[in-house]
Image (cartoon, rainbow, N blue to C red):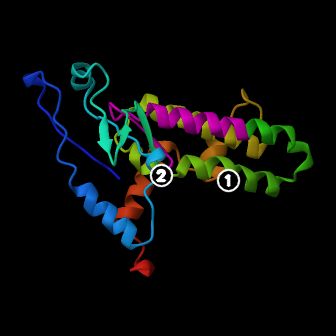
Amino acid sequence: MTISSTFTVDQRKLPQLPSWNATSDMDYWISANRLKLNMDKAELLWAGTRYNMSMLNDSGPSLQLNNVTVNVSQHVRVLGVHFSSDLSLDKHVSSVSAICFHHLRQLTRIRRSLDADSGSTLVHAFVTSRVDYCIAILAGAPKTTTDRLQRVLNAAARDVSDIKKFDQGLSRLFHQELHWLDIPERVKYKLHRHAYPPVSAR
């Protein structure tokens, strides 16, 4: 459930929450379909520019929904993607990077027990697939953000090819041998796949 509200900073007033009569219709639909709304997992995020959020003291009014108070969160997770109140993706990129590097460290411990194909399969399953998940949301992201995920892919490429951190030839290995795309190209590829699906899928 996504609830949004807009406000004007020049008014220097807290935004007024819209009418929540729609929630009764939502409750009816949920009950009619034999579902139940889990209020314990409901989250409220006020989003805006950093200047706008400073007018709310980086917070905002809470929401009273079905006799339950939903407090404001600085970060919310939607389908595995972390969103911040300023709509930056720093939290999401930090989470993905931390998880991927954790998996790479675990794979390093058992690398000697794996053949090349098995190691490559595990890297794709636990690292590159997580990097690629919802990567299209990084369209237009600054280079400082995409570079953090690029470091993850560089580490994964070294793990697959069993080369050291400061060995030369990483770019040639990355593009010519593994045939991997850099993060900006991966974002463009995902966008093109969504905008222009394959002819066979039409």
- The label nearer to you, 1 versus 2, is 2
- Residue at 16% across, 35% down: 16
Categorize mark 2 by other alpha carbons within 10 Å: few (<14), some (14-19), many (20+): few
Image quadrant where residue 25 sits: bottom left
Q: Which residues are magenta?
A: 80-103
Q: Is 90 positioned to the left or the right of 97 in the image?
A: left
Residue 82 located within the stretch drawn in magenta: yes
Q: Is 103 positioned to the left or the right of 45 in the image?
A: right
Above or below, 23 against 137 in this view is: below
Label 1–label 2 contact, CB within 8 A: no
Query: In this rendering, does residue 78 appear at all?
Result: yes
Image quadrant where residue 74 sits: top left
Query: In this rendering, does residue 169 appear at all?
Result: no
Total marks shown come to 2
- Residue at 80% across, 57% down: 117
- Residue at 37% across, 33% down: 71
User: What type is the residue that disc 1 sits on?
Assistant: His
Residue 109 x %, y %: 85, 38
Q: As rendered, which of 38 and 202 lies closer to the eye?
A: 38
Residue 160 x %, y %: 75, 46
Where disc 1 sits, the SS reads helix
Residue at the disc numbered 1:
124
Residue at the disc numbered 2:
79
Residue 169 x %, y %: 68, 36
Categorize mark 1 by other alpha carbons within 10 Å: few (<14), some (14-19), many (20+): some
Q: Residue furthest front?
A: 67
Residue 87 located within the stretch drawn in magenta: yes
